[in-house]
Image (cartoon, rainbow, N blue to C red):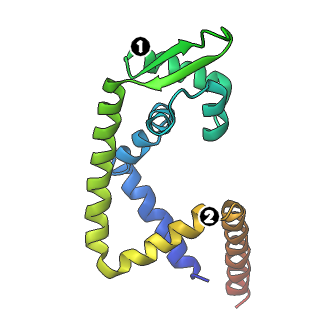
Amino acid sequence: MANTNDTYELIELIQKIYNQGRLDPFISFIDSQNRILLYLLTHENAHPSEISEELNFSRSNIANCMKQLEQLNYIERSINAENRREIYVNITDKGREYITIQVNEICKIFSLWLDILGDESEHLINILRISSSESSATEEFYRLADELKKNAHIEGKEEEQE
């Protein structure tokens, strides 16, 4: 397990990078609208409920995002002629062009980071693989964070007693 000082330094560095705005491309890339467009790139005639379920968004969030995306002409909604209650959602050429530019920009940044890491990039990729494949990864993170806090608290008390 990593020592507490390294963990706190990691948190401080991430916060510093965030405050400098260097995470802005990632934050905007993973916003609700972009995630919907990414989903629609590979799913034709998607139903709003399907998008909501796949992306773990509330139906109201999906409805609001789709309204905005439609106003930007990034998506189009159509009604099933055989079942008028059924709505299909598809990405437009303009939406495809927009999200492709976003993906390319993120790929440039990731490529730069991986180049900087060199052989060490495999460690980062492995961490991300493990984190994305385990449904309990978040729970494990919080369990470890709680354990670190307890250890730091215990170490602090021991230092006070000395």
Q: Secondary structure at mark 2?
A: helix
- Total numbered labels: 2
Instruction: Decide which of 71, 24 is in the foreground and name it.
Output: 71
Residue found at x 60% / y 17%: 87
Quadrant housing the N terminus: bottom right
Residue 133, numbered circle: 2
The first of marks 2 and 1 along the sequence is 1
Dividing the picture into quarters, in which one does residue 124 lie? bottom left
Residue furthest to the bottom in view is 162
**Compared to 142, does 82 lie above or below?**
above
Q: Amino acid at mark 1?
A: Gln
Decide: few, some or many residues near mark 2? Use Cα within 10 Å; few <14, some 14-19, many ≥20: few
Dividing the picture into quarters, in which one does residue 58 lie? top right
**Compared to 52, does 26 lie above or below?**
below
Residue found at x 26% / y 72%: 116
What residue is disc 1 on?
71
Cα separation between marks 2 and 1: 36 Å
Instruction: Please provide percent x and percent y for residue 35.
Output: 49, 38
- Position of 135 compared to 70: left or right? right
Residue found at x 46% / y 63%: 12
Instruction: Please provide percent x and percent y for residue 90.
Output: 47, 25
Quadrant housing the C terminus: bottom right
Q: Amino acid at mark 2?
A: Ser
Instruction: Please provide percent x and percent y for residue 146.
Output: 72, 68
Residue found at x 45% / y 70%: 125
Q: Secondary structure at mark 1?
A: helix
Residue 91, numbered circle: none
Decide: few, some or many residues near mark 1? Use Cα within 10 Å; few <14, some 14-19, many ≥20: few
